[in-house]
Image (spheres, grey):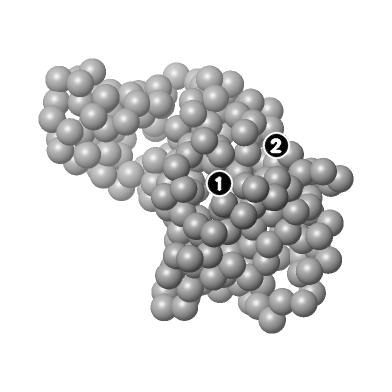
Amino acid sequence: MSAAFSTTAPLRLALVEDDPELRQLYSDYLCRQPELSCVLLAGSAEAFFEQLPDLLQAPQVVLLDVGLPGRSGLDSLPRLKQLLPDTEVVMHTVFDDPDRIYQALCRGASGYVLKNQPLAELKAAVLEVARGGAPMSRAVARQVLAHFKPTPTAQAGLLSEREQQVLEGMVDGLGDKQVATRLGLSPDTVRTHVKNIYRKLQVSSRAELLSRHAKGQL
């Protein structure tokens, strides 16, 4: 089975959610999107692994609930990544405590989003992770940073003073408009600084920047 991502064919998505109403809600929305093709729906990790051999092609993204009955989403991650090393996993959950988030990232998850997100943002997270991003709900990013937050250094001397200030705002969980208000800048100016920060630090998204910073890699 191959999990390679094609820019033309719909993205192959597997959805693992134990709540039947939520599973129906998510599948009704996501499976009707032209960019997505739902190849597997399961109510537990055990059901997911049982159905997996029947697929002609592996899912490219798995949207995996953390709080599953039986084997939890967290406990299923190592086996899932062993069987499907090229498949991206986005954890989908009501839990935003730092310990679960950190465990998920350490066990191979590429993203961590909360169930209170609008469905359109959930779709965006699935597409982002397939493009190599690391989607993370803002509340999740704040929890991660509150747990692991060092003072931003960003490789001293690499960023300008203003870029460092913008980075500090991002680390504090602020959006571009909020950073602009804090620093007395226009949102367009902040977005320009953000692009420069991404380029200098060699990251491709806000989630990747915050994840690397939380791990002390910046």
Location of residue 98 in the rendering, given as x and y in whole percent from the top left corner: 63, 27
Residue at numbered disc 2: 103
- Locate residue 101: give its quadrant: top right
Residue type for callout 1 = Gly
Q: Residues within 10 Å of mark 2 (few under 14, many from 20)?
A: some
At 42% across and 74% down in the image, what residue appears?
7
The image shows residue 25 at horizontal and vertical percentages of 57, 52
Q: Which is more toward the observer, 134 or 113?
A: 113
Figure quadrant of the N terminus: bottom right
Label 2 element class:
helix
The residue sitting at 46% across, 59% down in the picture is: 127
Which of the marked residues, 2 or 1, is nearer the chain's N terminus?
A: 2
- Count numbered badges in the picture: 2
The residue that appears at 53% across and 31% down in the rendered structure is 140
Residue beneath the point at 43% across and 70% down? 34
Against 25, residue 112 (above or below) is above
What is the x, y in percent for residue 80? Answer: 75, 58
Q: Is residue 67 visible?
A: yes
CA separation in Å, label 2 and label 1: 12 Å
The residue type indicated by label 2 comes to Gln
Decide if residue 134 is on the left or right side of residue 59.
Answer: left
Q: Mark on residue 218?
A: none
Q: Nearer the viewer, residue 97 or 209?
A: 97
Q: Assess disc 1: are there few (<14), some (14-19) or many (≥20) residues with their C-alpha within 10 Å of its C-alpha.
A: many
Q: Which residue is mark 1?
A: 111
Q: Is residue 107 left or right of residue 47?
A: left
Closer to the camera in the image, 120 or 205: 120
* Residue reaching furthest to the bottom: 56
Position above or below: 165 against 213: above
Would residue 208 be found to the left or right of residue 89 on screen? left
